[in-house]
Amino acid sequence: MSLRSQIKAVQSGLPITVMHEKWVAENPDPVYSPEAQAFAAGQLAGITGSMRRRKRMFRASAAGTCKRRQVLAYIGHPQRKEEITSTLGNIFATGNFLHLKWQMQGLTAGWLIEAEVPMDKPEINAGGTADGKLVTKGGFEFKSINDRGFTYVMTYGPKLDHQDQTDNYMYLGDMDHYSIVYENKNNGEWREFRREREEANMRRVAERFDELNTFVSDRRLPKVLDDCQAETGVQFRQCPFRDTCLKMKMFPRAAA
Ligand code: SF4
């Protein structure tokens, strides 16, 4: 990164960029801190073993997805078993390890003080796990993305669902800023974006959790999306409830 870019990064308040660039430049053969190594050992056990089990809750990471899907996930409705091809499995593994790389680097370089941070608010049945907490007390979210997606975020800024997600974490974790780092999987380029807490967004997040809780307590399902009525669209194709959603006439019994 050029001196001009570094000055610009500092002025624009990007807490990761300057420290990370410096650390990467000074550590071509990195030796990770004991804290980073201990974190990685725990994560590797988690990645290959059983995931941490928690009370059912509405997930911050699901912000921006169909509300009906969020309610079905919350009550534990059975999900379609997707076929995991070797290519897809490889994509998931790459994503996991890129996360781990950034978290270990952040813990070692000092811009991250904690990684995989639970942000649960059981009183509103909501929660999630942040990728990390920054030394500036803000949050850290990492996204690996292909070249086309990277060009999009460089042109228009963070994707809307990622903005929603970080608003959710700021609300749940009571934070006043958040950094999203996108890494281009095609060439290793990366870019940090900073988001500030805005009270209008916090109200919108609170209303969303309130609305989702009301659906469950009233035993009502949010309506089917228009695209899904026609069994089309990305949301439908990626929904784990697409086999049963359109057939549901009543609120389903919660899974045990
Ligand atoms: S099939 Fe469509 S409407 Fe139904 S839960 Fe999934 S995304 Fe929502």
Image (cartoon, helix red, strand yellow):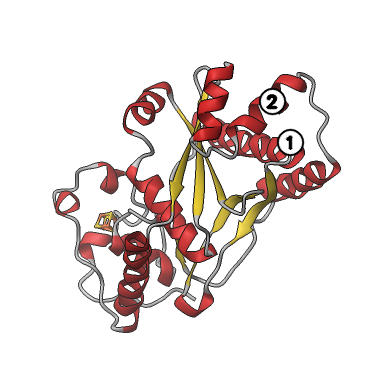
Three-letter amino acid code at the position of disc 1 = Ala
Compared across the picture, whether 159 is left or right of 192 comes to left
Q: Residue at x 68, y 45 (%)?
A: 112
**Tag on residue 22?**
2
Three-letter amino acid code at the position of disc 2 = Lys
In the image, 205 versus 14, the foreground residue is 14
Q: Residue at x 44, y 46 (%)?
A: 195
Q: Residue at x 58, y 40 (%)?
A: 15
Compared across the picture, whether 132 is left or right of 226 comes to right
Q: Secondary structure at mark 1?
A: helix
> Which comes before the other along the chain, label 2 or label 1?
2
**Tag on residue 224?**
none
For the residues bearing labels 2 and 1, Cβ distance under 8 angstroms: yes
Q: Position of residue 2 (x, y in %)?
A: 57, 16
**Tag on residue 109?**
1
Q: Is residue 153 visible?
A: yes
- Label 2, label 1: how many angstroms apart (C-alpha)? 9 Å
Picture layout, residue 54 above or below residue 136: below
Picture layout, residue 148 above or below residue 226: above
The quarter of the picture where residue 153 lies is: top left
In the image, 67 versus 114, the foreground residue is 114
Q: Residues within 10 Å of mark 2 (few under 14, many from 20)?
A: few
Q: Position of residue 162 (x, y in %)?
A: 40, 46
The quarter of the picture where residue 50 lies is: bottom right
In the image, 112 versus 67, the foreground residue is 112
Q: Position of residue 25 (x, y in %)?
A: 71, 20
Picture layout, residue 2 above or below residue 90: above
